[in-house]
Every structure is written in structure tokens, then in C-alpha cells.
């Protein structure tokens, strides 16, 4: 890592750590931004690096959300009574119970989706292209419908997650969730960056560029595809667990298995920033979030129209995303060696 | 990596954006009392969200033009900051947070639907922001021990209770066979619980118990079963779309059932949209224009109906009326508290005991309104095909007699 890079990372880290104090009113938005970046970055592992456009990552996100909340409640109180009739009875967590429950919940929320990804990956990752995309789209929809019928997690009534305990004043909840999501973001970034510096990424790229050839070269493509998906599932589950606590209320199709919004947004953010790059999804998610929040305030009721326009603009003018566009414009900055004469010759050919 | 500059520019741009976009409203600016509200302007609840917003606006207009709110010898006017919650609980919770921490709102109005209210209540409760809501009827909202949540409406489990009891009564006190289909959302599921209680009480039997998806546009499967099993009562609840879908398919499939009980008929403008096809449908309603409640701002239901129609071009469903009532409650509480202290306003709200054009309002310790019963109306059409909603129960307000059983399609 060069010195310049080190400064950049330290700068971002300091910004991240001080942000909730500089912008105390924006803690929730910043926490959501962190979650969005995690989702976009991990979606990029399949969609960008591996070339498998998954709409199914929402499955792991929703699973994580329900699991985390269920564990957090179930560890100390009878879960069925908590969710019965939409929460007739209310139990109050002590601060210690709340944090222990959350910690245990997040562990389960990370591990179970990973296992699920491994199990379903074996059958689903045999599909390619559109077939894979459609199949994963179905996963999210099915999960939403099924979870909407399970009484113990509240079914159609929804699931109110444990309220933040009386602890540390008014700002404590926002700060807790911000730092939790920021920590998960940093963890995700380091993990993904490390993975991208290994042969594993090259294998994923090989699968994207030509899966048959990769296989012919002796790569067990199925194994790597499943591992890639499991890594995504791990972080999606964590993100879901945090989001559940942050929102405070889980609804099967509108909050947890929200394929229509979150499921599409994670794809959109990665594409907007530039899929197949490390920084692309991060930039994409940030711009997307700011854009959406902005339109939300200033163009009340039109935010989805604006979003539609944004998608059209991305597809027409930035098909490779922002990072892709920058790369084309300033290839030298991305460490590509460009022969001036060559470039001129190309321009003239046009 | 040479993209450092880009990223630095980018990060600083965000910082700049964030810092400049802090628009700070205070709770009371000059002579304005600023209330915050997230309503569904888009998404599946958008039509009811608009009813809610219109109801709020109507009351704000009326109260402001009739002298405003007098607190501490000074006159104030209401103003509402709206956001669109997109019918999504996740968004609603975020918006509650945003209204309070960014916009500095200290008093809130509720969103549309129980699910969204459920998502917002923990936030307002945490900050101690009094919220008067008019569209979250789920029973579970009132068993959580929330101190700052006040609902001007009767809880959801009471919506169709009367219908079942009426059916049993007409059946000579013997239990009836009930078929029911409910949308998978907090409100409808609560209506379902109410039916289960009523069925148990009256010894009725539930022979069909179906769940309907959220994006509701087909319930043919349930109706086929109804045709086969011939229940005495068919109960359907699924907000506006549920009511529209039920009537459309019942008339298409010519399903004969002696009693059809629903929710949201007036919000769906059933009698207008489906005319004679919607005839005889029984609907639970929080309010009807013919009820005889009075207040000094809107006078009575008929006047409210006329004024609202003049202002917005359509007759007010109860969702609009109850939303207007929420503002009246707030005004009353501010004046009695004679302060903008959140605790004092909260205590004043808890002590509310008033009559509005919409009904009597008095809150139980849980926050629900206990002094206003539900009414049932039936869609009735004259021979020219003009349909109207007429109150049939409770008897005190009934303007027409319940038609039971519903004539068969072949005899209409």
C-alpha cells in the first residue's frame, strides 16, 4: 500500500468516525448509507466480478434481519408471545440483554445465510445469464411470501424489534447503530479488498469472461461461484440484522424481503458506480443515497420519476458506471499505459 | 491508485452537501406551530395517503382561518411539513427520525396505515414527541405502553365485530358460517383477530380463512371456495384495493352470499366506481356524514362533507374526516396545556375529552379512542342506479334498514 493510499484510508476512517458528531442530525441516514455500501459492494462480487447478475441477495438480507431480531428476542423472552397478535405483550430488554442479544443475533444473521447460500447455490449457480437472474428474483419473492405466513415471526402483522433500552441518553441509539454499521462497512471493505488482491478474484473474472474456458483450464468453477455467493451472503446477513434494529419494525415484503426496493437498489448502486471495481459500488451507493434523499425532500412525490430518469441516464451515458467512465477518460490514472500515437490513430479511425 | 483526488473531492462534496442541507425548522417559528407528517403519496397506500393529507390540510385551513390557536395570550397558526413515506415502513421510520432530528419537529401527525404507524411510534416515543394519529388502528399499537401516541379512531379489531353479531342475531342467535380473506398486513390481520373473537363469542364457525397478498388484485381462488361451501357471511379486508378487487370479482363470478362485510368501501369509492355491482355490501366505517356529532369548526358531518367536496372535488371518506379530527385534538390540547412543552402537551392530550364533527374523543391509557363506536353502512342503490352509503348499524344512527340476505345475482 502506498503512502498516498494510506492517507486516503486514514482520512476516510477519520471522517467516518467523526461524522456522527459533525452531522448529529444525519446519523440514521449515514447508518443507512453504510448498509447500502455493504450491500452494493457485496453484490458486486457476483454481479461485477463474477458476471452473475443476482437479484437474490435480498434473500440473505431479509433472512439476516429476521434471524437477528428473533435471536435477540428469543434469547430472553418467549418469541411466540412477543410476536403474537402483532405484539400484544411487550417485554423490556435490559441494556445488557439488548446488547448481548444483538451480538448473538448478528452472529447468527451472518452464519445462517452463508449456509443457505451454500445449499441453494449448488443448484442455482448451474444456471447462467438471464435464467440465473430470473431464478434469483423468484427467491426473494418466494421468501417474502413464505415469511408473511409464519406466525412465530409475526406473519402479516410484522415484527417489532426490541426497542433500544434506556441507556446513555437520546443520542445513544443513533450512535450505536451508526458505529455498528460503520464497523461492518470497514470490515466488509477490508475483507473484499483482501479477497480482490488474491487469485480468487482472477478466478471470478475468468468465470465472468468465459466460464467454459475457465473450466477447461482446470478451475472448479462451481466451487468458486458458491464460495463467492457465500461471502456475499455473510455480509448481506449482517447488513440485514443491523437494518432490522435500525428500522425497528420488520415487515415481510416491505422491509425484510424488499426485492422491489433494496433488491433492485443494490444492483443499481453497483452499476451506477461501476461494477467490477472496488470503489465503484461505494461511490455509486453514496451518490444514489444522496440523490434519493435530495429528491425526497425537494421533489415530493416525484422521487421515483427522478430515479427512473437517473436509471435511463446511467444506461445511456454511463453504461460502465462512473468508475468505468472515468477509466475511459483518464486511463493513465488507473495505471493503464496508453500509447499516445495509438490513441490518436484510434480517434482518427472514427 | 491514482483516483485519490477524485475520492477526496467526492468526500468533501458529500460533507458540503450534508452541512448545507440542514434546514432547521423549530417547533414554533414566529406565529407558526410546525407539525411533521409522513404520508403515503406514492405506493400501495397512495390513495388513502392523499385522503389523509387532504384531511389534514382541510383542518389546518379551517383552524387557521378561524383564528388559529391561542397559547399564552398569543395566536398561532398550524403548518405541516410533509414527506412521502412511499407506503413503506422502513421509510416511515426513517422519516420520523428525520422530521425530529433534522427538521426539529416536536409534534407529529400520524401516517396512513397501522404498519407505518407501528414503524414510527418507537421513534416518536424515544424522543418524547407527541403524535396524534388518525389512521393506525391495529390493536397492538395500544398495548405497547406508548405514552406519546394518541389515536382518534377505534381499534381495528372492532371494525367488523358488529357485522358478525348482526348476522348471528338475524340467524336467530345461532352461530353462522364465516368465510374470510384478509390481506397480509398489520391492519387487516387485526380485523381478522376481531372476527376470530366474535366467532368464538357467538359460536360461529370459520369455514374459509384465506390470506391475500399485499399487491392485491386477484382473489378468485377464495371466491371459488365461497361458491362451493356457501358460507353465511363473507368478510374481506385489504384496504382500498381489497375492497375494489372483491367487488369486481364477486360481480364477475356472480358469487351469491347472504352477507358481504368489508372495510374501506368509502375510501375506494365503491358506490361510484362499481355502482350497482357494489350494492348490498356492508362496510365498517369510523365515520359517516349522517352522524349527528357537532363542533364549532366544521359544524357537523353534512357540512364537512359539503366543504370537503367543494375543496377537493370528491366526497370525504372517513380517512379524511378522522385526519381532520386529529388537528382539532391538537389545537384543543395546545390551548389547554397553554404551553409548547412536550410533556405538558402530552398530558393535555391524555386528558382530552371533546366532541368533534367526527365523533367524541377520549383516550384510554393505551392511547386509543374509546368513546366513539364504529358504524356499519350498506351500499344501497335506487332504481335509477344511483348508489349511496346508508348507515344501518348501530341502530341509534341508522338511516336505513339492513337488507338481508343479499338477493341472488340471478334475481337482481
Image (spheres, grey):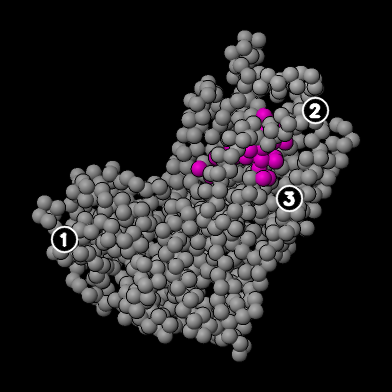
Give the secondary structure at mark 1.
Answer: loop
Say which of marks 2 and 1 sits in front. Answer: 2
Mark 3 vs mark 1: which is more N-terminal? 3
Report x, y in % for residue A6.
86, 38
Question: Which residue in the protein does label 2 denote?
Answer: A332
**Where does residue B320 sit, x and y in percent of width and height?**
41, 68
Identify the image quadrant of the C terminus of chain A.
Answer: top right
Which mark is nearer the camera, 3 or 1?
3
Which quadrant holds the N terminus of chain A? Answer: top right
- Write down the residue under mark 1: B405
Label 3 sits on residue: B14
For residue B363, the mark is: none
Residue in the picture at 61% in, 64% down: B99
Q: Chain of mark 3?
A: B
Q: Where A6 sits versus B128, above or below?
A: above
Magenta-highlighted residues: A260-287
The extreme right residue here reads A3
The secondary structure that dominates the magenta segment is helix
Within-10-Å neighbours for mark 2: few <14, some 14–19, many 20+: few
Amino acid at each position: 500500500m502506498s503512502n498516498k493510499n494510506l492517507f486516503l484510508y486514514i482520512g476516510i476512517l477519520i471522517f467516518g468516525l467523526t461524522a456522527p458528531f459533525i452531522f448529529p442530525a444525519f446519523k440514521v441516514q449515514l447508518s443507512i448509507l453504510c448498509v447500502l455500501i455493504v450491500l452494493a459492494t457485496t453484490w458486486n462480487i457476483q454481479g461485477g466480478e463474477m458476471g452473475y447478475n443476482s437479484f437474490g441477495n435480498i434473500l440473505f438480507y431479509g433472512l439476516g434481519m429476521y434471524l437477528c431480531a428473533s435471536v435477540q428476542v428469543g434469547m430472553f423472552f418467549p418469541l411466540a408471545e412477543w410476536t403474537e397478535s402483532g405484539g400484544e405483550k411487550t417485554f423490556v430488554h435490559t441494556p445488557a440483554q439488548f446488547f448481548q442479544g444483538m451480538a448473538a443475533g448478528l452472529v447468527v444473521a451472518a452464519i445462517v445465510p452463508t449456509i443457505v447460500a451454500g445449499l441453494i447455490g449448488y443448484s442455482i449457480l448451474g444456471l447462467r445469464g438471464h435464467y440465473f437472474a430470473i431464478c434469483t428474483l423468484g427467491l426473494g419473492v418466494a421468501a417474502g411470501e413464505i415469511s408473511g405466513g409464519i406466525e412465530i415471526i409475526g406473519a402479516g402483522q410484522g415484527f417489532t424489534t426490541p426497542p433500544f433500552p434506556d441507556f446513555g441518553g437520546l443520542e445513544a441509539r443513533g450512535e450505536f447503530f451508526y458505529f455498528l454499521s460503520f464497523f461492518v462497512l470497514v470490515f466488509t471493505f477490508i475483507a473484499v479488498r483482501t479477497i480482490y488482491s488474491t487469485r480468487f478474484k482472477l478466478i471470478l473474472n475468468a468465470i465472468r469472461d468465459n466460464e467454459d474456458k475457465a473450466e477447461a483450464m482446470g478451475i472448479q468453477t462451481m466451487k468458486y461461484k458458491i464460495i463467492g455467493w457465500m461471502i456475499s451472503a455473510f455480509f448481506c446477513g449482517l447488513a440485514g440484522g443491523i437494518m432490522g434494529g435500525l428500522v425497528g419494525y420488520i415487515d415481510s415484503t416491505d422491509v425484510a424481503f424488499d426485492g422491489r426496493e433494496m433488491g433492485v437498489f443494490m444492483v443499481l448502486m453497483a452499476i451506477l458506480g461501476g461494477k467490477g471495481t472496488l470503489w465503484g459500488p461505494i461511490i455509486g451507493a453514496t451518490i444514489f443515497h444522496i440523490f434519493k434523499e435530495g429528491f425526497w425532500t425537494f421533489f415530493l412525490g416525484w422521487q421515483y420519476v427522478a430515479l427512473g430518469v437517473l436509471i435511463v441516464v446511467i444506461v445511456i451515458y454511463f453504461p460502465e458506471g462512473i468508475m468505468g467512465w472515468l477509466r475511459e477518460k483518464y486511463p493513465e490514472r488507473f495505471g493503464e499505459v496508453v500509447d499516445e500515437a495509438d490513441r490518436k490513430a484510434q480517434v482518427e479511425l472514427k | 491508485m491514482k483516483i485519490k483526488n477524485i475520492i477526496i473531492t467526492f468526500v468533501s462534496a458529500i460533507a458540503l452537501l450534508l452541512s448545507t442541507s440542514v434546514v432547521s425548522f423549530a417547533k414554533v417559528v414566529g406565529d407558526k406551530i410546525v407539525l411533521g407528517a409522513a404520508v403515503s403519496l406514492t405506493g400501495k397506500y397512495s390513495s388513502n395517503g392523499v385522503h389523509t393529507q387532504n384531511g389534514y390540510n382541510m383542518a389546518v385551513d379551517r383552524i387557521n382561518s378561524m383564528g388559529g390557536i391561542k397559547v399564552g395570550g398569543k395566536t398561532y397558526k398550524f403548518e405541516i411539513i410533509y414527506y412521502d413515506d412511499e407506503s413503506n415502513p422502513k421509510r416511515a421510520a426513517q422519516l420520523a427520525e428525520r422530521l425530529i432530528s433534522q427538521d426539529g419537529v416536536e409534534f407529529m401527525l400520524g401516517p396512513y396505515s397501522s404498519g407505518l404507524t407501528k414503524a414510527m411510534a418507537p421513534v416518536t416515543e424515544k424522543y418524547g414527541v407527541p403524535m396524534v394519529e388518525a389512521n393506525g388502528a391495529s390493536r397492538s399499537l395500544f398495548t405497547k405502553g406508548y405514552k406519546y401516541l394518541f389515536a382518534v379512531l377505534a381499534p381495528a379489531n372492532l371494525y367488523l365485530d358488529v357485522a358478525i353479531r348482526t348476522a348471528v342475531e338475524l340467524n336467530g342467535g345461532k352461530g353462522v358460517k364465516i368465510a374470510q380473506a384478509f390481506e397480509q398486513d398489520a391492519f387487516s390481520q387485526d380485523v381478522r383477530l376481531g372476527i376470530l373473537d366474535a366467532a368464538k363469542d357467538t359460536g360461529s364457525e370459520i369455514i374459509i380463512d384465506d390470506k391475500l397478498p399485499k399487491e392485491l388484485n386477484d382473489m378468485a381462488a377464495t371466491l371459488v371456495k365461497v361458491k362451493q361451501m356457501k358460507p353465511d357471511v363473507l368478510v374481506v379486508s385489504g384496504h382500498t384495493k381489497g375492497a375494489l378487487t372483491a367487488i369486481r370479482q364477486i360481480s364477475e363470478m356472480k358469487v351469491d352470499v347472504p352477507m358481504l362485510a368489508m372495510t374501506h368501501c368509502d375510501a375506494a369509492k365503491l358506490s361510484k366506481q362499481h355502482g350497482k355491482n357494489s350494492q348490498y355490501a356492508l362496510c365498517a366505517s369510523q365515520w359517516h356524514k349522517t352522524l349527528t356529532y357537532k363542533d364549532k369548526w366544521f359544524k357537523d358531518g353534512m357540512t364537512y362533507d359539503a366543504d370537503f367536496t367543494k375543496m377537493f372535488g370528491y366526497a370525504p371518506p372517513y380517512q379524511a374526516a378522522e385526519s381532520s379530527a386529529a388537528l382539532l385534538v391538537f389545537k384543543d390540547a395546545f390551548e389547554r396545556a397553554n404551553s409548547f412543552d412536550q410533556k405538558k402537551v402530552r398530558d393535555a392530550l391524555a386528558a382530552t375529552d371533546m366532541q368533534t364533527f367526527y365523533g367524541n374523543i377520549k383516550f384510554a391509557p393505551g392511547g386509543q379512542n374509546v368513546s366513539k363506536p364504529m358504524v356499519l353502512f350498506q351500499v344501497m342503490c335506487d332504481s335509477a342506479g344511483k348508489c349511496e352509503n346508508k348507515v344501518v348499524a348501530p341502530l341509534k344512527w341508522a338511516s336505513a334498514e339492513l337488507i338481508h340476505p343479499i338477493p341472488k345475482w340471478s334475481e337482481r
